[in-house]
Amino acid sequence: MTITPPPTPRRVAFEEPEFSDPRSLVPDDLEFDVSRETTLPKPARPRTLVIANQKGGVGKTTTAVNIATALAMGGLTVLVIDLDPQGNASTALGIEHHEGVQGTYEVLTANSPIESLIKPSPESDGLWVLPATIDLAGAEIGLVSTPARESRLLHALRTFKDKYHPDYVFIDCPPSLGLLTLNALVAADEILIPIQCEYYALEGVSQLLRTINLVKGSMNDHLHLSTVLLTMYDGRTRLASQVAAQVREHFKDETLAAAIPRSVRVSEAPSYGQSVITYHSASAGAQAYLDAATEIATRGAAMNLTEERSA
């Protein structure tokens, strides 16, 4: 199954007038239930993946943005929840997130419904974003005395999914294991870990896995590591090959066949407010993310068959 990207890159215009009040949007306008031509298989139920790795610079946001875009271009409905106060995922998907824009912070601290705050991304039809602003940096302090503070995102997302049934939800986390990431781990069913093909690549993963086991044992029994993606792979170096082999040995079933190469185009795309898939579709990085997205969707279809057989 293949995804056909647009032929030419484009720049996103940020001069568009803002919405007067995002909460004035009518939920029915989201059109999550409108069928579109699908070239990728749909999962039987919404899949919620948290993209986590407390080690910075491994490609978490880049992976969230490009996998989500590729799946949406394949005809699926995708929601990206930006949980990083830096708002890089919002930037890369062409969504404004300056001070005053409401988004993840209001969902966590004020119980605002997700559907009233998400914005459609210009990257693809069917792709929606819940933006993050710098206000989110204070959310952990503000939630300290809040009851069930680790499950705020879970309740909001559960209500949204029950009503709109998106195919995929991706949660982009900050490079830490604080309360924001904990909210993501409690709200998700699956974990996608991007691992950089460099020295000490697996060093931080062991700590993340310990955290996952703690969450799984006490707050989210459904959480499991389903996907590992090799990033910044340089096949010309022996080190990258050795790290890739080590990761595939440790995570034999979870590691995708596709590996994301080091690519100048991947680094350039966010400055244009785009994914690399729409910025330069012919680049090696774009093709690798398209392959990874296809593999994720295909695995989702295989999960459907497994559930049917066990039913």
Image (cartoon, grey):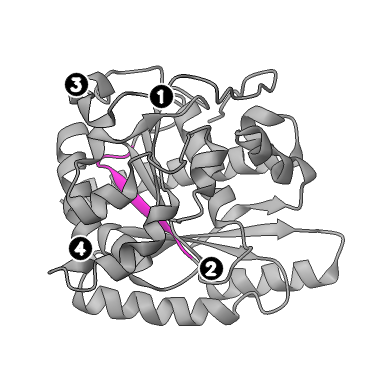
Asked if labels 2 and 3 touch by Cβ distance under 8 angstroms, the answer is no
Mark number displayed over residue 38: none
Nearer to the camera, 81 or 240? 81
Q: Specify start and end residues of the magenta stretch as a single range.
A: 43-52
Circle 1 sits on which residue? 18
The residues tagged by marks 4 and 3 sit, at their Cα atoms, a distance apart of 26 Å
The magenta stretch spans residue 66: no
Residue type at mark 4: give it.
Ser
Q: Earlier in the sequence, mark 1 or mark 3?
A: 1
- Residue 111 percent location from the top left of the image: 17, 49
In the image, farthest residue toward the right: 236
Foreground mark, 2 or 1, reads 1
Residue type at mark 1: give it.
Glu
For residue 4, what is the image quadrant?
top right
The residues tagged by marks 2 and 1 sit, at their Cα atoms, a distance apart of 47 Å
The residues tagged by marks 3 and 2 sit, at their Cα atoms, a distance apart of 42 Å
Residue type at mark 2: give it.
Lys
Residue 58 visible from this viewpoint: yes
From the viewer's perspective, tell me whether residue 33 is left or right of residue 134.
left
**Other residues around mark 1 within 10 Å, as few (<14) / some (14–19) / many (≥20):** few
Circle 3 sits on which residue? 28
Residue ID at (19%, 22%): 26
Q: Earlier in the sequence, mark 4 or mark 3?
A: 3
The residues tagged by marks 4 and 1 sit, at their Cα atoms, a distance apart of 31 Å
**Other residues around mark 2 within 10 Å, as few (<14) / some (14–19) / many (≥20):** few
Q: Earlier in the sequence, mark 2 or mark 4?
A: 4
From the viewer's perspective, tell me whether residue 99 is left or right of residue 260.
left
**Other residues around mark 3 within 10 Å, as few (<14) / some (14–19) / many (≥20):** few
Circle 2 sits on which residue? 252
